[in-house]
Image (spheres, rainbow, N blue to C red):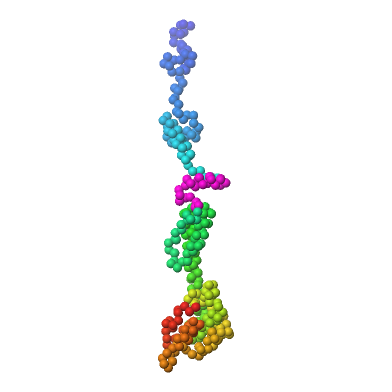
């Protein structure tokens, strides 16, 4: 046996990595242990987050804890919107922490409306309606900015509607004029003036001038907005208030008080009575006498 060994046979040696007898150089064949990172115990999702944020160094842990503490502090100071059914006191505390411009109005006295720019000069702004809307804004819990916005929208809408109404009214007056001209002749003709005079007389006798003005049928300048009204009152005047029965004024029948008598004088008493009772007829008679009607009769006889 000894001879065989000496002849070059291989002598069995311990396997690499034999724990029972480690090699002389200290290497047992296994991989050397690696140092553990502070986030080795994290879940896969948190590990990826740490790598994405660059929190891979040991000092990152202290920074993360510091940031978390600051976040908790800020969270405690942040506003929490109360639940819809929360007590009023909770909502009051919440609103008290808001900037003043964002707080709901609490009293109509604190509402100050500014009129929007660009309103027509003749726009009929209603202070009464504006004051009433202040209480509505408080009831709705509106902020000053929201209340002003609704005010401006409403006022501008009303201004637009007023403009539309004025246009429609002007068209009605124009249509009335055209209709009467077709039936009564040109406005500067005697026939037109006589019929208009009779219609005006009937309207006055029946006491409807103010009522028609209030309803918009008769405009402040005396213009009618419905030709049928003028025609109806002309018919009534012809039937009930003929010229010789105006105010029982027989002194006016057949005469023209604007014409001078032989002495060059006018009957000022009759002129005054005629202007008051029938300004349309007074204008016609003044023109017939060669006088300027505007010097004797107001431009708005009605």
Which of the 4 image quadrants contains residue 34?
top left
Above or below, 144 relative to 90: below
Residue 175 seen: no
Q: Where is residue 70 in the image (x, y as percent from the top left)?
A: 44, 36
Q: Nearer the viewer, residue 58 or 210?
A: 210
Q: Where is residue 254 in the image (x, y as percent from the top left)?
A: 50, 90
Q: Which residue is drawn at 50% across and 71% down?
A: 168
Q: In this view, which residue lies farthest toward the top?
A: 2
Q: Where is residue 174 in the image (x, y as percent from the top left)?
A: 49, 76
Q: Residue at x 52, y 75 (%)?
A: 218
Q: Residue at x 48, y 50 (%)?
A: 103
Q: What stretch is highlighted in magenta?
A: 84-106
**Residue 92 forms part of the magenta stretch:** yes
Q: In this view, does 61 lie to the left or right of 206?
A: left
Above or below, 212 relative to 22: below
Q: Which of 216 and 243 is in front in this view?
A: 243
Above or below, 149 relative to 199: above
């Amino acid at each position: 046996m000894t001879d065989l060994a000496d002849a070059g046979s291989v002598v069995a040696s311990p396997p690499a990595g034999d724990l029972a007898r480690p090699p002389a150089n200290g290497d047992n064949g296994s991989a050397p242990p690696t140092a553990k990172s502070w986030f080795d115990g994290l879940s896969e999702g948190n590990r990826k987050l740490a790598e994405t944020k660059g929190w891979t160094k040991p000092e990152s842990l202290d920074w993360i804890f510091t940031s978390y503490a600051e976040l908790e502090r800020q969270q405690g100071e942040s506003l929490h919107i109360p639940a819809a059914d929360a007590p009023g006191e909770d909502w009051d505390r919440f609103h008290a922490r808001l900037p003043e411009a964002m707080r709901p109005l609490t009293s109509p006295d604190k509402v100050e409306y500014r009129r929007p720019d660009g309103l027509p000069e003749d726009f009929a702004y209603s202070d009464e309606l504006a004051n009433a809307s202040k209480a509505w804004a408080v009831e709705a819990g509106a902020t000053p900015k929201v209340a002003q916005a609704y005010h401006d929208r409403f006022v501008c809408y009303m201004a637009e509607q007023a403009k539309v109404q004025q246009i429609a009214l002007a068209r009605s007056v124009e249509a009335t004029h055209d209709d009467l001209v077709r039936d009564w002749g040109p406005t500067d003709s005697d026939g037109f003036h006589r019929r208009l005079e009779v219609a005006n007389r009937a309207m006055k006798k029946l006491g409807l001038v103010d009522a028609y003005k209030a309803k918009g049928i008769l405009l402040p300048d005396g213009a009618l907005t419905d030709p049928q009204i003028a025609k109806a009152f002309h018919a009534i005047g012809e039937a009930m208030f003929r010229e010789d029965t105006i105010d029982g004024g027989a002194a006016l029948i057949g005469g023209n008080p604007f014409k001078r008598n032989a002495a060059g004088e006018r009957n000022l008493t009759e002129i005054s009575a005629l202007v008051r009772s029938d300004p349309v007829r007074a204008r016609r008679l003044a023109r017939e006498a060669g006088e300027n009607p505007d010097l004797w009769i107001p431009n708005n006889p009605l």
